[in-house]
Image (cartoon, rainbow, N blue to C red):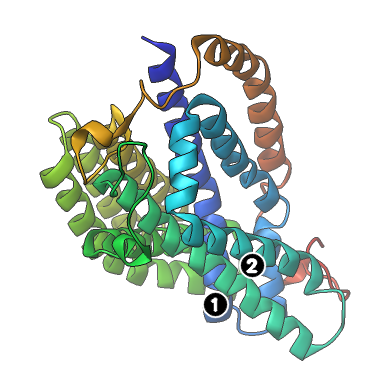
């Protein structure tokens, strides 16, 4: 297997990890106002992700850095063509991170309420726009012979991309609800488990339509297996939620996101950014790649440091594995009890 193919696979794995881990972060943030009946409830919800949310975002940083180093033309065309959506995502992530740190600094209901809104919108917007962005990557965008984006913002807001955004929005909300059902105890855990049943039923419709549309228009024979796995996992998540098997429900929502991401990268390969103007203008793993020497150095760096990152993050999840409830919240404000 060529190094270009290996790095396409690794970037796909990084995005898969990001969507699975940051997906439940986004879901918790989006559901803050819906499930948090008072400030204590909302602090319980934030504390479930407080120790891990910033570590989960490392996957995004590494995925972006790997794309820049391994496929610089792909990175350049993405950031020029998707400039506004990516800027909105970046601002939303910054505001969300600031909100986590600042909401407990002043003992004021209005202060906390405003930062809670920032967390909700800072979670909702990326959840929607990541789906729009990746749907457009799969569908292709207008590129000229120099691989420059020649479309407009409206080009990106096509029906397929909007359905992709709705799909990630629903899946992340469901993923967050199942995570809260697994991670919390008491009334808030009960409400999260109840909501996850509704969200599972809702998510089946856009996710099913989007994946079938993707497969029929862009798919390969083998990607039918990934589509089938995503569908089966989503149904299993719904069944597990109804049966109050929160551990299995969370596992199956994670598996749904994994299978969906595999589908997108599977139908995309060997392109990295197809051109709707002319097939010859498309960016592929070959013409968008860095030099073989660069890819070789990157491979050795990845082999050395990836196990360290995985071990550290696994240790973090193990340390903070206990359920969180209202009794865990002290009188003072803050993210961590």
Residue that label 1 marks: 35
| Residue sitting nearer the eye, 45 or 266 | 266
Q: Residues within 10 Å of mark 2 (few under 14, many from 20)?
A: many
| Residue sitting nearer the eye, 217 or 127 | 217
Q: Secondary structure at mark 1?
A: helix
Quadrant of the snapshot with the C terminus: bottom right
Q: Residue at x 66, y 15 (%)?
A: 304
| Residue sitting nearer the eye, 322 or 259 | 259
Q: Earlier in the sequence, mark 1 or mark 2?
A: 1
Q: Residue at x 77, y 89 (%)?
A: 109
Q: Position of residue 323 (x, y in %)?
A: 65, 56
- Where, by quadrant of the figure, is residue 246 drawn? bottom left
Q: Residue at x 66, y 59 (%)?
A: 48
Q: Secondary structure at mark 2?
A: helix
Residue that label 2 marks: 45
Q: Is 269 left or right of 289, judged from the image as shown?
A: left
Q: Residue at x 61, y 19 (%)?
A: 302
Q: Is residue 200 visible?
A: no
- Where, by quadrant of the figure, is residue 169 drawn? bottom left
| Residue sitting nearer the eye, 311 or 117 | 117
């Amino acid at each position: 297997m060529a190094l270009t193919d290996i790095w396409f696979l690794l970037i796909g794995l990084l995005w898969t990890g990001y969507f699975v881990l940051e997906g439940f972060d986004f879901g918790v943030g989006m559901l803050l106002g819906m499930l948090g009946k008072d400030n204590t409830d909302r602090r319980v919800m934030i504390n479930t992700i407080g120790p891990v949310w910033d570590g989960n975002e490392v996957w995004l940083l590494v995925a972006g850095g790997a794309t820049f180093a391994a496929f610089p033309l792909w990175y350049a065309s993405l950031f020029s063509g998707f400039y506004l959506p990516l800027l909105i995502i970046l601002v939303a992530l910054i505001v969300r991170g600031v909100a986590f740190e600042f909401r407990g600094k002043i003992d004021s209901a209005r202060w906390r309420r405003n930062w809670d809104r920032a967390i909700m919108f800072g979670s909702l917007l990326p959840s929607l726009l990541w789906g729009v962005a990746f749907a457009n990557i799969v569908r292709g965008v207008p590129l000229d012979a120099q691989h420059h984006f020649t479309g407009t913002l409206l080009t990106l807001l096509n029906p397929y991309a909007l359905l992709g955004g709705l799909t990630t929005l629903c899946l992340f909300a469901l993923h967050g609800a199942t995570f809260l059902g697994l991670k919390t105890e008491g009334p808030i855990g009960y409400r999260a488990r109840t909501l996850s049943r509704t969200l599972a039923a809702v998510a089946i419709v856009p996710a099913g339509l989007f994946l079938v549309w993707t497969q029929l228009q862009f798919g390969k024979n083998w990607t039918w297996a990934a589509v089938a796995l995503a569908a089966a996992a989503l149904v299993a998540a719904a069944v597990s939620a109804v049966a109050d098997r929160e551990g299995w429900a969370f596992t199956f929502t994670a598996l749904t996101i994994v299978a969906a991401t595999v589908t997108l990268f599977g139908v995309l390969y060997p392109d990295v950014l197809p051109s709707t103007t002319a097939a010859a203008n498309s960016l592929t793993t070959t013409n968008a790649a860095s030099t073989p020497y660069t890819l070789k150095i990157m491979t050795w760096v990845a082999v050395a440091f990836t196990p360290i990152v995985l071990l550290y993050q696994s240790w973090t999840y193990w340390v903070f594995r206990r359920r969180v409830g209202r009794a865990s919240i002290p009188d003072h404000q803050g993210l961590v009890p």
